[in-house]
Amino acid sequence: MSTIPQSRDREEAVALAPKPGLWTAVRELPSNVWSSIFRNPLPATDLERAQTSFTNFFLHLHPVKVNRNTLRPAYTLGLGLISLFLFLILVVTGVLLMFYYVPSTNQAYDRMLDLRGTVAFGIFLRNMHRWSAHGMVAMVFLHMCRVFLTGAYKKPREFNWVLGVVLLLVTLFLSFTGYLLPWDQLAFWAITVGTSIAGYAPLLGTQIKFLLLGDTTVGQEALLRFYVLHVAVLPAVLTLLVAIHFWRIRKDGGLSRPERKEAGEGVVKMRFEPQKRVFGLQGFVRGPFTKIGNVPDDSVYSWPNLLMAELFVFVLTVSIILVVSLAFNAPLEQPVNVMHPPNPAKAPWYFLGLQEMVSYSAFWGGIGVPTVLVLLLFLAPYIDRDPKGVGRWFARERLLANTLFVTLVVLNVIFIVIGTFFRGPNWAFVSPF
Amino acid sequence: MPLVVKGPDPKGPEEPVSRRRLLAWFSSVGLVGSAVLAVVSDLVFFKPRVTYSPSARFSIGKADDFPSGTRIARDVERVCIVREGNRMAAISTTCTHLGCIVSISDTGFACPCHGSRYDQDGNVTGGPAPKPLPWYKVTLAPNGEIEVDKNSPVEPGSYFTV
């Protein structure tokens, strides 16, 4: 064969090439370093755009091409991305805060005061962490609403929906465990109230509460347990689940979108020619929606379209968090006084709907209704199997499912609003106006 | 002649379970069992055998320190010591609703957090509380002091006779 002489030629050529001098090496140092890191120049052709997604470590989780519908801001509202970016902000600010925090009942509150008084940017970091945490709970919830109202949980995305519900629960638990760490009155009594709700679970309620607190009441053991859960266990679990969540988006054929129009307009018939490798970098994973050989040509290259969209959402998210953190300080109340609960003692806002329901019936409000709701969420894609109306907001075919969902969401929001603004001392009804 | 494809007999071969299958089955049981054991031992690990909070069993002093008609709330231990005649009892002051500390009121106990109200014996008379306040065992320690054990709930209405 001809390959052997060729390679021999090359070896000879390498051997005969003049040895680059030291001056040349110095002169070319910057470009050599650059090209050793980034092997390809910025993509100029479609082939290079496709290769970018393959060769860059940070970009390889992107598809080569994405459907135009995926990039429509009005379809996704960017809610999943915003949740991710808030999580990234939380990891960065959280790790920074860990350098100054001590999970001890004697020191934790003083460390909060230190953040305010002595640590450079301390109060600003705490604000960013607090507001991002509230924002993440809200955004993950809204993301779930978006997915439901566009019917995006339908086959083949059922399992990714289930993962999403788990992610919502983990997010809530993460926020809840972080709530205790400042060790102020707000933290202590919110966790006392919150874990008491867990204690209402039948049979295992008191056991769960004891395992969570490491004691019969909220104290040093609870603070340490919540700290470890908050900074190590739950972020690791969340990261793993997020990775699977993203991976499944690709494996399930990209984001949901309306069924494509019948072959004809907008559809380009393609033939699969493996020898020429023309479509070897085909962006879509083989899946139920896009078949090689009959690809609707309404997709665009991820580089730069998807990346610019992501960058835009990232800058927007960070900007809003920065502005909010400059404008508003995270609350810090008096240090814990176990003898004197504030009146009323309130759980974190996202649990106030729960607390409001608990004030009517401890078991049904705290355990019964929430369990049924979470089960309904988990089972939604397995109960609602009708494939119609996927990829559009408020599709007419999904009127019943959407109405039920919106009703439950509105009810939950109403309970949260009542619990937050309309409940005063002794949980009596008060007017906030 | 119809084509007959020879395959494994659906009724099963003479030897119903091959060695390979049996080993696979045992291995699966072993692996699943180990996983279950791991989870159980995790839970055992997470359940503290000793808590660092003050003992659930504590002394409250001599019986003579509590004249008849006394109702004293001890916020640190979260119990209310009751004495009527020569009978004594300890009633929890942790609200059964959401764990706030109830305070002594004219009619019994009242919770500042969500408005639960209890009568003198801890029975719920209003508010969201789902259960009456538990009573704890009161005993006489060998040194002559009265002891309360919060790990031993007793029937409401069961007094210790001094």
Image (spheres, rainbow, N blue to C red):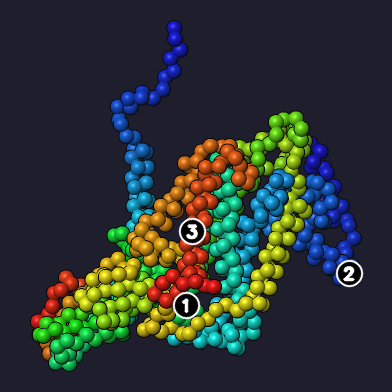
What residue is pinned by disc 3? A412
Same-chain status of marks 1 and 2: yes
Looking at this rendering, what residue extends furthest in the bottom direction?
A: B65
Q: Nearer the viewer, residue A50 or A33?
A: A50
Chain letter for the residue marked with disc 1 in the picture: A
Chain letter for the residue marked with disc 2 in the picture: A
Chain letter for the residue marked with disc 3 in the picture: A
Label 1 Cα crowd, 10 Å radius (few <14 / some 14-19 / many 20+) = many
Pair 3/2: label in front: 3
What residue is pinned by disc 2? A27
Rendered position, A262 above or below A328: above
Residue at position x 75%, y 34% in the image: A267
Q: Position of residue A132 (x, y in %)?
A: 60, 69
Same-chain status of marks 3 and 2: yes
Q: Secondary structure at mark 1?
A: helix
Same-chain status of marks 3 and 1: yes
Q: What whole-number distance in Å separates the C-alpha atoms at marks 3 and 1?
A: 22 Å
Q: What whole-number distance in Å separates the C-alpha atoms at marks 3 and 2?
A: 66 Å
Label 2 Cα crowd, 10 Å radius (few <14 / some 14-19 / many 20+) = few
Residue A186: mark = 1
Residue at position x 72%, y 65% in the image: A315
Q: What whole-number distance in Å separates the C-alpha atoms at marks 1 and 2?
A: 62 Å
Q: Secondary structure at mark 2?
A: helix
Q: Secondary structure at mark 3?
A: helix
Indicate left or right for A354 with A89 as reference: left
Q: Nearer the viewer, residue A47 or A380?
A: A380
